[in-house]
Amino acid sequence: MDYIQNFLSGRIWLKEQTPFPLSEINNYIQKGFITPHKGIQKNHSSISIKNPSYQCRRCGCKELTAFNCARCKGPCLYCRHCIRMGRVSSCSELITWTGPVIISNTEHIFNWSGNLTSLQEKASKELLNSVYLNQSHLLHAVCGAGKTELLFQSVLVLLERGQRVCVATPRTDVVLELAPRFQQVFPQTIIHALYGGSPEHANYAQLIIATTHQLYRFEAAFDVVFVDEADAFPYTIDKSLQFAVYKAKKTDAVVHTITATPSDELLQQAVNISVISERFHGYPLPVPRFVGLYNYKKHMHKGKLSPKLERWTQQCLKKIQPFLIFFPTIDLMERALPLFQQLHENIQAVHAEDSERKEKVLNLREMKVCGLLTTTILERGITIPNVQVAVVGADETIFTSSALIQIGGRVGRSIDFPDGDLVFFHHGISFAMDKAKATIIRHNDTRGRK
Amino acid sequence: MICLTCSTSFLESASWQKLFLIKTPEVICEKCKVKFERVKTQKDNNNDWIGSIYEDALDSVQSIYSYNEWMKQVYQQYKFQLDVELAKVFIPDFQQLLRIQELIVPIPLHPDMLLVRTFSQVEQLLCVANVPFTEVLRKTVNGSQIGKSKKERMSTELFFSVTSDVQNKKIVLVDDLYTTGTTLHHAAFVLKKAGAQKVTAMTLIRA
C-alpha cells in the first residue's frame, strides 16, 4: 500500500495512466482508499439546467471538444487544454487518494548560513508573520533583491510543522534554478522538481517545486503555496493556471505571491504586502534611456541596421561587454540576425522553442558568444555579469511595463558590475515605457529616502 | 480563429468560397501549415514485393505528406494522445475523394484496439471530410507494426478478412501511414482474392 499511498497522496491522476497494476487500484477503490472521479464533470455553477455546461476535472477548462467515441458508443467530450498530460474525456476516470493520511516528517536540517540585508530581514519576518497568521502575503521585491532567500525561514517553519509546501512558478527555467538551491538548504528533505518532461518520482515529497502547469495534477495537497514570478506569462493570462494553484491547495491554505512587478489584481488580492525597493548589493536600479529608432522595421526589411542600433552594438563589441537585444517578434529577430552577424559572426539568436536555449545563455555568461538576440523569453530568471541590454521596438504592445521592468532587471545584477546600459529603442514612446521608467525611478527614490 | 496545432490566434483570410461554405474554414495558422511537406514524386512502392504473392495485389499508392519532424509531432498527438480534433487539419486533403467513383475502404483497427483508442484514426479523417466510406475489411490480429523490422513486417501472417461482397469492384484503400506497405499489400491481397477488380490506395503520410 505504501507506494501507492506515497504516489497518489494529494494528486489527481488518470486511472489509465497510473504506474500501478489496475487490480490493486480497483482493490483500493473498493476499500474506499482511492476515489474515482469522472474526467469531465457537469459545471455546478451553470445557469441553464437544460443545457448544462461541462468542465475538465483536472484543469477546469470549459471549452471541451466533442467526438463520436467508440468506448462511449456515442458522443463524448474531451479536453484539449491539458491533453499533453494524457487525455481526459467523458469516459476516462481520474483518481485521488482518500485513504489514511501520510504523517509528514517534522525534523528537517536547515543548512543556510547566508546573510540577509536589513530590508530582506524585515520582509522575511513579515512573510513569516503572515505564515503564522495564515494570511496571504505579497512580496514585492525589485529584480535582483534576492527573493528566494526570503522564503527559506518560512518554508522551514512550515516543514517543521509537518506541513506540505509548494513553490510554484510559471517558468520551467525558474524551477530548474530554484530546486537545487532549496535542496542545498534542506539537504535531508525530500524535494521534487516538477515540470514538463521531468523524471517521475514514486516517493512522497513534502516540498514540491513545480511549474504552475504541473499543479493540474494535484488536488487539495498543499498547506501553503508560494507562487514565484506570479506575473509571468502565461500565469496572468491563462485563468486555468490560477485555477490549478487554487485546486492544488487545501481549502483553508493560503497562497503567497512573489514578484518584482505585481499587477493591480495581485495588489488587490494580497492581505499583507512587503516591498523591497533595493537590490541586495545596495546600488540603484539602472534607469532606461529612450532612444528614437524610427522606421526600424523598414530598415530591417531592406536588409539594413539602423545606424544608432549598429553603433550601440559596436560599442558593446569594442568594450567586450556581453549584450542582450530584445525583439518584439521571432520573425523580426530572425530577419535581423544575419545583419548582426555581419558586425560579428559570434552573435546568436534564441527564442522559446529553441532547443539550445540553455546552452546559448550559458555561452553568453561564459563570453563564448558576444551577444544574444532574444524575445521576451529571457526577460526574467537569468543573471549575466556586466550584461548590456537594448530593447528594439520597446513601444510594441508585447513589451508591457512589467516586461520592460523585468528586462531592465537583467542589468547590473552582480556586485562586481552593479551598473550597465539599458536602452529602449522605439518608434514613439508608449505608455508602458513611461510607466516602467517611472516605476524604476520611484523604487530608486524610495531607496534613497531610507 | 485559434490554431489547432500551436494554439495561437490567427486571422483567417476572407473569401467568397468560405462565405458560401464551399470551402471549409481554416483550422491552423499559415505558419503551421507551411511546415507540412507534400510528397512531390510518388515513390515506386512495388519493388519490395516483387516475387512475393503480393506482387500484383496493389495497383498503385498515392501519399499526400512526407513524414517530417513536424508531421511526426502532429500525428503523434492525433493518434497516440488521441487528439481527435486534429483530423480537421486534413479535411481539404481528403475532400478530393468526394469526386471519385470507386468504393472507399478505410483500413480498420482491431475491435480491441478501437476500445483503447476510442476512435479510428483513419475513419475519423474521412468522417470530418464528409467522405462516404464502406467497411469491408475486418482486422483479425491485434498487433502493432511498431518496433518490427522491415523483414519482420513483410513476412507477417495475413491479418485481414473481407466481410462483404467486393466482386468486380474498384476499391480505394485509405490508410494513415505507409511505411513498408505491409498493411496495404495484405489488404489488397485479400480484396483481390475476394474478386475485386482494381485496388489502389491513398495514405496521408509516406514515411
Image (cartoon, rainbow, N blue to C red):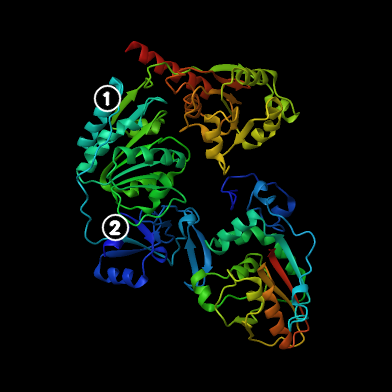
Q: Is residue A44 above or below residue B60?
A: above
Name the amino acid, label 1.
Answer: Glu
Q: How many residues crowd around disc 1 within 10 Å: few (fewer than 14), some, or many (20 or more)?
A: some
The residue carrying pointer 2 sits among few (fewer than 14), some (14 to 19) or many (20 or more) residues within 10 Å by Cα, namely some
On screen, residue B73 versus residue A88, left or right, reads right
First reached walking from the N terminus: tag 1 or tag 2:
2
Q: Nearer the viewer, residue A99 or B46?
A: B46
Residue lying at 43% horizontally and 41% vertically, measured from the top left? A176
State the mark number for residue A407: none
Q: Is residue A324 visible?
A: yes
Q: Which structural element holds mark 2? A: helix
- Residue B38 position in % (x across, y down): 74, 57
* Residue placed under numbered mark 2 in the picture: A6
Q: Position of residue B4 (x, y in %)?
A: 58, 53
Residue B48 vertical placement versus B160 (above, below): above
Residue B1 placement (x, y as % from top left): 60, 48
Q: Quarter of the image containing the N terminus of chain A?
A: bottom left
Q: Which chain does tag 2 point to? A: A
Same chain assignment for discs 1 and 2: yes
Instruction: Specify the amino acid type for callout 2.
Output: Asn
Counting from the top left corner in percent of width and height, residue A218 is at 35, 52
| Residue labelled with disc 1 | A121
